[in-house]
Every structure is written in C-alpha cells, then in structure tokens.
Image (cartoon, rainbow, N blue to C red):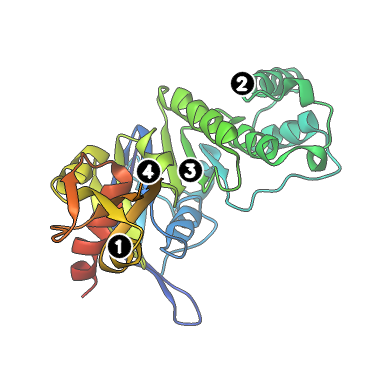
Amino acid sequence: MDISIQDLTKIYPNGHKALKSVSLEISNGMFGLLGANGAGKSTLMRILVSLMSPTTGKVLVNGEDLRKNRKAIRTMTGYLPQDFSAFPKLRSWEFLDYSARLAGVKGKQKRRDAVEEMLEEVGLYEARERFANNLSGGMKRRLGIAQALIGDPKIIIVDEPTTGLDPDERIRFRNLLTKISARDVIIILSTHIVGDISSTCHHMALLRSGRLMYNGSPEALINQAKGNVWKIKASHEQFDEVNVKFNVISSIPSVGGWELEVVNESPKGFDAVPIEPNLEHAYVYYMEHYAEASLL
C-alpha cells in the first residue's frame, strides 16, 4: 500500500488556509503526523478519509485518485476521529456489528465472528454487553479503534487517539497500534503528543500552521538537536532567569535549587552539561530553529 499526497491545499470559506501545499509519501507501517492543535492535522485526516475535499492538489492511493475512486478507497479505510462517539443506546457488540455492516462485512455469522475477535483484541470482551455510554474514556477509545479495524482495512487513520487517556490506557493503545502495524497496512497516527510518535513510528512528519516542516525518521530529527540540549543546575534565584532565557523542557527540584533540561545552542553563564536529546527535545529545537525560517 502507498499514499501519495500531492501539493494539497485547503482554504475554508472564511478564508482560513488550513493546509498549504502539503506533499507526502506514506507507505506500509506506522506513520506519525505531529503538530500542535490547529496545525492542520485533522483537516488532512478528513481529506484522506474523503470527508472533505481539498481546494487544490490530490491524493493517490495505490496510484488511484481519491476523488475519482472515493467509494472503493473508503471501503479499505478505517477511521478513528478525534471526536469519536458511539451510539449510546447500542451495546458494545451491537455497535461493532453495525460498524461491520458499514465496512461491508456480509453474512451474520461472519460479522459475529469478526465482532468477537475484535472485542478480544481490544480487551473489551468482558464489556461486550455494556452500553457505549457506560464505558470509561479509555474503553470508549478502544471501542473506537475496534470500529476502525472491524472490516480489516488496509489504511487505518487515527486522529489524536490518546487525548484524555490515563498513562496505562495510553501505553495499551500504542501497543495495540504497534501490533497491528506489523500487518500489511498503513497506519497514520495524528497527534500533538510527542511520546505517541517516539514509541511507535519509524517515519514522521511535522505540520505547523498548515505547512509541512519536516518529513523523515524520528532518529534523523533527533540527530539535528545533538549538542543543543543541556542539563542546567540552577539556584532558586536563577530559576526565573533560566526560564526566561531558554526553552525549558523539564524542571526537577534538587538540593539547593533546580535541575532543568533546556534546548539552546549555548547556555552560557550557567552550570550546564550536554545531554542526549530525545524526540521531545528535537521537536522543540526544530520548531525554534528551522520552522520559523520555513514560514517566511
């Protein structure tokens, strides 16, 4: 499977330019789309699942134009929107059975088998008789990914899937997506949470204000931040000064002051030692040093 996004632009009726000439190539495996809220991620996701048309540009799926082959491509696509909600008067298994019908799964027994298998896979089998509105937030998100997967789609698009989940649910969700990504599928994970990308994706892109800022591996992005991430030991009196001068990623109280991780080319005047960057450091560094120039 492959998706080719070519020079995609979306302008809303009010004049807001949500996407600005975005071009991407996406192949099998887990692809991460990272950006702050309002970066254009959800707009791009809605175009990819044909819920919205671009103003200009096109999307090809295995060489087929999405606009011209909308119905066929939608049948091979599973989608978990950011604002997913199930029908509250349906039990979990009933909602998945309905989702299976929409996904084109024919035959009552075949749907029943698919529903049972999916409930097991997402850890909801014991809650199969519970109504959707009685599920916890994490269970609702699991039901959401189940409805996205029920028709065995070749393209799976999940938009902000871990927002509002507790740490255990977030890890469980990411592990489930990682397991599924081993199949012959494309999974596009759209998020503003850096940890969701760093633990699951081998390829990623950054969006900012509708523009593509970066396209490559997380490792390559991290390499760009090497030599620019520091641990600073600061006194209580220096704490405010450090926060004003540098991009502070974390701050931990210590004896006599603070230990702070900062992103900066050279934090002179402080007790600083270089540390190995992670993806969160790299994201902040890249946006600070490269994205501004790209927006000019």
Q: Residue at label 3?
A: 73
Residue extending farthest bottom: 14
Judge by depth and name the residue closer to the eye, 236 or 114: 236
| Quadrant of res 246 | bottom left
Asked whether residue 5 is in view, the answer is: no
Q: Which residue is mark 1?
A: 238
Image quadrant assignment for residue 99:
top right
Whichever of callouts 3 and 4 sits on the residue coming sooner in the sequence is: 4
Q: Amino acid at mark 3?
A: Ile
**Which residue is identified by label 2?**
121
Disc 4 is placed on an element classified as strand
- Earlier-in-chain disc, 3 versus 2: 3
Question: Viewer-proximal residue, 104 or 249?
Answer: 249
Front in this rendered view, residue 194 or 157: 194
Pointer 4: what residue? 32
Q: Is residue 232 left or right of residue 209?
A: left
Q: Nearer the viewer, residue 238 or 2?
A: 238
Q: Label 1's element?
A: loop
Please tell me which of labels 1 and 2 falls first in the chain. 2
Question: From the viewer's perspective, is the residue at label 1 or at label 2 nearer?
Answer: 1
